[in-house]
Amino acid sequence: MRFLAIGLAVLVFAAEAAAESRHVLKGRIIRALAIDPGNPDHILVGQKAGKPGSGLVFKSLDGGKSWRTQNGNAPMAPAAADVQAVAALSGTALLAGSWQDGLAFITKDGEVTNRILKGKAVIHLKIADQTLYAGTWGDGLHILPLAGILLKNP
């Protein structure tokens, strides 16, 4: 009888966990994931796509219940096919690094206002103490003041 009670408890727990689970963005290769430290409902993912100009960043503002592209289905850069890294900034702005197309600052409205590390494969992004750490494929670690990246191109 005791084993039956334990078995039923496990089944109830498993059923509750399955009811809370979601599978979203099906059929896409997700290369990067970031959650805004100031707002856990703001989630970003970077997609690996097949051809230049098809690399997209998806965002959710409701904890993953709904998703949309960050900039109206336009790629983050003309040659970007693979968004390798994303980092959430305050609000809904973000940084996105791509394979061989550098790093882009994208506003909450989806506008790309600054591009740096052009031609570099940016594969890791971390932010700490107003400093951006950008890991690259074959070009080492770039350590940059965040304030300089957020400025709009002249």
Image (cartoon, rainbow, N blue to C red):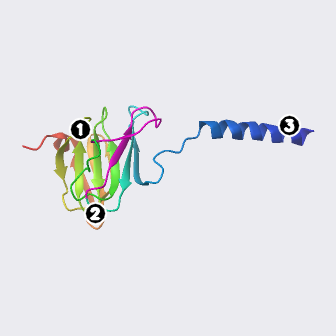
Q: Which residue is mark 2?
A: 140
Q: Which residue is mark 1?
A: 107
The residue lying at 28 percent from left, 37 percent from top is 93
CA distance for labels 1 and 3: 54 Å
The residue lying at 43 percent from left, 32 percent from top is 62
First in sequence, mark 2 or 3: give its number. 3
Q: Residue 84's x, y, as percent?
A: 34, 56
Q: Is residue 67 above or below residue 82?
A: above
Q: Is residue 2 above or below residue 122?
A: above
Q: In which quadrant of the rendered image does the C terminus lie?
A: top left
- Tell whether 45 sits left or right of 146: right
**Of residues 32 and 68, the one drawn nearer to the viewer in this rendering:** 68
Task: Determine which quarter of the picture holds residue 90.
Answer: top left
Q: Residue 33's x, y, as percent?
A: 41, 48
The question of residue 49 being in magenta is answered with no
User: Callout 1: helix, strand or loop?
Assistant: loop
- Tell whether 152 sits left or right of 69: left
**Furthest residue to the bottom?**
138
Q: Are marks 2 and 3 in contact (CB under 8 Å)?
A: no
